[in-house]
Image (cartoon, rainbow, N blue to C red):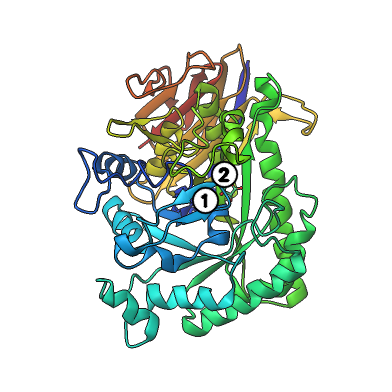
Amino acid sequence: MQATGTLHRDFQISKIDPRLYGSFIEHLGRAVYTGIYEPDHPTADENGMRQDVIDLVRELDVPIVRYPGGNFVSAYNWEDGVGPKDQRPVRLDLAWHSSESNHVGIHEFADWAKAAGTEMMLAVNLGSRGLDQARAFLEYVNHPGGSYWSDLRRSHGREEPWGVKMWCLGNEMDGPWQIGQKTADEYGRLAFETAKAMRAFDKSIELVVCGSSTPRMPTYPAWEATVLDYTYDSVDYISLHMYFDKQQDDTATYLAQTARLDDYIATIAAVIRMTKAKKRSAKDVYISFDEWNVWYHSKEADKKILEGGGGWPHAPALLEDIYNFEDVLQVGCIINTFIRRADVVKVGCLAQLVNVIAPIMTVPGGPAWKQTTYYPYLFASRYGRGTSYQLALDCPGYATDFAAKVDYLDISAVESDADGALTLFIVNRHETEAIDLALSLQGFGDRKVIMDKEIAGHDLAAVNGPDRQSVQPRDGSGVKLERERLSAPIAPLSYRMIRLG
Ligand code: AHR
């Protein structure tokens, strides 16, 4: 089977915002407690944070991490997490039916973010609370001093403000599961007024208004049209979320779901354009895709706790999906979709980072380890920064219930800002056949292969664990480059990254 394509140096899609490779940590399950924070762990630093986890996050080079939720934020009092730890209240977290000790709050998370080399993206509670606590939190976090909230921060040992730039106006406010769910009109008004108050404090912050929790919501995409109608000139991003599950035992349909993702992005990009025109606005609003991942493996196991049959445990194992080789291919296709839509998707958050639907897992008191999906995220984050290119591809494909044609090969192309290398990220969805890829590279000059990695040849169900890395990259082979023509055999069901320097 063959596929042919052309990349031309004049056909750029967009500069990629490095924050496309962000992630997310919520007070949920073991993401925080025994995830990033475990004071008794042998590698714990002076703040009780696991250094082994910090090292893995640093290896991923995560540019930004959203915090503290997620559904959790919609009933969270941020003040519970500041001041002396022994005086912080234990609260019942209604989102995840768990107890929250509040031993980690904004101070601890900010120290962790600094140690992990990442920026914070904070969410305010617009579920059980509103504008007043949002402005208080912003003042606590970003004001230098001489006011009630900023001086409270200083009295808790942090002299300098953190200067957090990105703020989310609530979380998934369209969802019936959300504490304080709102209609699009209720939320649109509240988000507008909250944005106004937050901007009155600081015009330079970037604000993210909630879009749909999934394209399956009955309110999608009218939700976005209504919410943007209220907030277009007050916000910078609209957030989208999407999780990928496998409803039937069918790899082809599972891996075709990025066609839905593509459609979701295109639809909301159109709603943004329509609203811009309606408002006669000169400014642009972009998409912050601040929750995405595969999420289905753990759903059955989580029912007991989430339905209240497990009491109110502190940091229980929840959403601990163990990812397999098939999920490597899915994550590769998702990231490729974002790279190809880097013109409108500026921020992305892999949900989540540690233990909860995460690329990094920990054993309490024991090792931290890499899930299978760690690798496509690692490669994109390290080598997918720069400019994304349009690829004209002629490739055989297949039909599903929701897409007329899904190409077997899913490819994105990025020219690096750092070293000028051209990187191709390739997934072959074909279950049995290798595909001979022939690409004409026009205007990229003389190149040679400087890196070729593939993840291939595994059982689709193969997983990693604390003491085995069964699924990990190895060197690829067979790439030929003659003048401006590249050819490469792409193995069936494989993830591949080829870098040309
Ligand atoms: O990431 C897990 C949950 O998924 C988040 O808390 C919520 O925003 C979404 O429904």
The x and y percentages for residue 449 are 36, 29
The local secondary structure at tag 2 comes to strand
Name which of mark 2 and mark 1 comes first in the sequence.
2
Which residue is tagged 1? 348
Which residue is tagged 2? 292
The local secondary structure at tag 1 comes to strand
Question: In the displayed structure, does residue 11 sit left or right of residue 382?
Answer: right
Q: Gap in Å between the C-alphas at discs 2 and 1?
A: 8 Å
User: Mark 2 or mark 1: which is in front?
Assistant: 2
The x and y percentages for residue 153 are 32, 74
Q: Quadrant of residue 190?
A: bottom right
In which quadrant is the C terminus drawn? top left
Disc number for residue 208: none
The x and y percentages for residue 419 are 33, 46
In which quadrant is the N terminus drawn? top right
Q: Residue at x 51, y 31 (%)?
A: 321
* Crowding near the residue tagged with mark 2, few <14, some 14–19, many ≥20 C-alpha atoms within 10 Å: many
Q: Give whichever of 169, 492 is nearer the camera.
A: 169
Q: Residue at x 33, y 78 (%)?
A: 152
Amino acid tagged 1:
Gly
Q: Give whichever of 390, 299 is nearer the camera.
A: 299
Answer whether residue 27 is visible to the viewer in this image.
no
